[in-house]
């Protein structure tokens, strides 16, 4: 049995040979056995958070139709909570997962290969300036050469200003200007484009360092989390997205909105995604409807730009984002995190690629703290898959050999990967599959450090949450 995740996955996805009757499987569930495979799910952009339980008595669908922590007040309106789909087949579990994903989303947004550079996993938002961003753009342009599909340079966290008099850098809004050398963001975008690379920009739409006159949801991290159900919030976010596009950024990566809106990371949600202290301004719409409206506002404001969702509920955003970060952060500091998060999400959510959106398993790092022998394998697999490939390359790690590996992989990814992509082979028994099929080839990767084996401790860089999937207990009814 295999389920999905409420938003990103956190390294927890795996086939269960001994299913737990009380466990809720978000959005969809697959069952595979000697008689074949079947799956059940709900259409994307549902009106409720939908989860499945499977036990000896049958299959149950659970719908959370609250507005935050409160009962929704429909006022006579009829709620379309979910449309249910059911598939069955005998072509194997991966084919069944692909068929189910294809049935649940009939209108993914088309986009070409998403490939480029992002400095997060060597800079982590500190001690970089616009010149460093342009240097990375020049690097990625040199590595891909004359390929007709042009890569991206994504300016990640660390460019914005916190709104105080001293103009410090911040990871919260307002998003109307940058700090220091990023003061003129239109100039930064033009300098990136001048290197023959497409500009991209990260921002955190529901976090403000100033308390807004309307639309505040709760104090958070020295600022305010904004309420996505409030019209003032949607006006602010729409203006921010339009401004970013007007600056000249072709790709917008928006982040943290699930945590800001719902107060939890996906791995903390269990069967009840929203905690009891989240009170939305608009109680006439369910949490799911509020989030869909928020994603739609960003999509419409972006126009013909590319939207990449991160910490976004993928099942509700499919058809409103071109690309989706399907797993939690990889790392430029601890290889084990990349194995746990990146390899796991690539394997277990790969079926959503091009059926929901372009899957982004997160960046491949080249840093002094992580072994290139491991990272280059992840680079190779992602490039072959045709999913999004972004690299974080510390200039100190560049050698002729590293550049050659990067160049070959980036150009392959810009081609769209290998025809037919890749498929995990040992995923029924391995949460980070090592054996993959690519066309007629069978590929074996060595993910685990020989000296220590897999690390049972959470020695991560703590750039985002990580933890086990919390499941309900107490019989076949989830702990609601």
Image: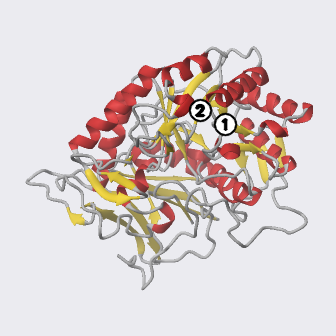
Q: Are marks 2 and 1 in contact (CB under 8 Å)?
A: yes
Task: Tell me residue 271's x, y (percent).
Answer: 41, 69
Check residue 119 in the rendering and tell me which mark sits there, or answer none: none
Viewer can see residue 297: no
**Residue denoted by label 2:** 154
Depth order, front residue of 222/225: 222
Viewer can see residue 165: yes
Label 2 sits on a secondary structure element that is: strand
74, above or below 192, in the image: below
Crowd class of label 1 (few under 14; some 14 to 19; many from 20; radius 10 Å): many
Depth order, front residue of 113/44: 113
Q: Is residue 395 left or right of residue 101?
A: right
Task: Tell me residue 128's x, y (percent).
Answer: 65, 37
**Nearer mark to the viewer, of 2 and 1:** 2
Q: Residue furthest front?
A: 166
Task: Tell me residue 314's x, y (percent).
Answer: 46, 47
Identity of the residue drawn at 49% across and 24% down: 184
Q: Is residue 178 left or right of residue 16?
A: left
Q: Where on the picture, by quarter, is residue 149? A: top right
**Residue denoted by label 1:** 390
Depth order, front residue of 118/356: 118
Label 1 sits on a secondary structure element that is: strand
Identity of the residue drawn at 91% across and 31% down: 400
Q: Where on the picture, by quarter, is residue 140? A: top right
Looking at the figure, which quarter contains the C terminus?
bottom left
Depth order, front residue of 445/80: 445
Query: Is tag 2's residue or tag 1's residue first in the polypeptide sequence?
Result: 2
Looking at the figure, which quarter contains the N terminus?
bottom right
Task: Tell me residue 389's x, y (percent).
Answer: 67, 36
> Rounded to the nearest whole Å, what is the CA distance between mark 2 and mark 1?
9 Å
Q: Where on the picture, by quarter, is residue 403? A: top right
């Amino acid at each position: 049995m295999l389920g999905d995740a409420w938003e990103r996955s956190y390294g927890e996805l795996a086939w269960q040979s001994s299913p737990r009757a009380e466990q809720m499987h978000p959005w969809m569930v697959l069952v595979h056995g000697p008689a074949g495979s079947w799956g059940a799910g709900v259409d994307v952009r549902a009106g409720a958070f939908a989860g499945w339980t499977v036990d000896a008595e049958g299959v149950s669908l659970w719908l959370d139709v609250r507005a935050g922590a409160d009962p929704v007040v429909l006022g006579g309106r009829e709620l379309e909570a979910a449309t249910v789909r059911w598939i069955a087949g005998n072509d194997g579990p991966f084919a069944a997962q692909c068929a189910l994903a294809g049935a649940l989303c009939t209108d993914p947004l088309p986009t070409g290969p998403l490939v480029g550079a992002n400095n997060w996993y060597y800079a982590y938002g500190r001690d970089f300036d616009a010149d460093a961003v342009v240097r990375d753009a020049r690097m990625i342009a040199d590595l891909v050469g004359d390929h007709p599909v042009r890569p991206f340079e994504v300016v990640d966290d660390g460019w914005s200003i916190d709104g105080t008099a001293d103009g410090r850098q911040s990871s919260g809004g307002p998003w109307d200007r940058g700090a220091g050398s990023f003061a003129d963001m239109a100039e930064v975008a033009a300098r990136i484009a001048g290197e023959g690379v497409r500009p991209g920009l990260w921002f955190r739409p529901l976090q403000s360092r100033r308390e807004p006159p309307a639309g505040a949801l709760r104090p958070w991290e020295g600022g305010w989390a904004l309420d996505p159900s409030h019209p003032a919030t949607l006006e602010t976010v729409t203006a921010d997205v339009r401004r970013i596009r007007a600056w000249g950024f072709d790709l917008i990566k928006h982040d943290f909105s699930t945590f800001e809106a719902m107060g939890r990371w996906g791995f903390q949600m269990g069967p009840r995604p929203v905690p009891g202290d989240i009170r939305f301004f608009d109680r006439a719409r369910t949490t799911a409807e509020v989030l869909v409206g928020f994603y739609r506002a960003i999509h419409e404001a972006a126009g013909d730009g590319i939207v990449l969702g991160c910490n976004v509920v993928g099942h509700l955003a499919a058809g409103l984002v071109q690309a989706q970060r399907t797993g939690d952060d990889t790392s430029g500091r601890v290889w084990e995190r990349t194995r746990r998060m990146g390899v796991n999400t690539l394997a277990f959510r790969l079926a959503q690629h091009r059926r929901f959106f372009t899957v982004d398993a997160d960046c491949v790092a080249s840093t002094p703290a992580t072994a290139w022998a491991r990272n280059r394998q992840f680079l190779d697999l992602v490039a072959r898959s045709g999913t999004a490939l972004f690299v974080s390359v510390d200039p100190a790690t560049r050698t002729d050999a590293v550049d050659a590996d990067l160049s070959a992989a980036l150009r392959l990814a810009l081609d769209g990967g290998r025809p037919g992509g890749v498929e995990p082979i040992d995923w029924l028994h391995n949460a980070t599959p090592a054996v993959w099929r690519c066309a007629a080839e069978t590929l074996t990767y060595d993910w685990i450090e020989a000296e220590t084996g897999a690390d049972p401790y959470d020695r991560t860089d703590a750039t985002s949450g990580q933890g086990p999937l919390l499941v309900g207990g107490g019989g076949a009814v989830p702990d609601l």
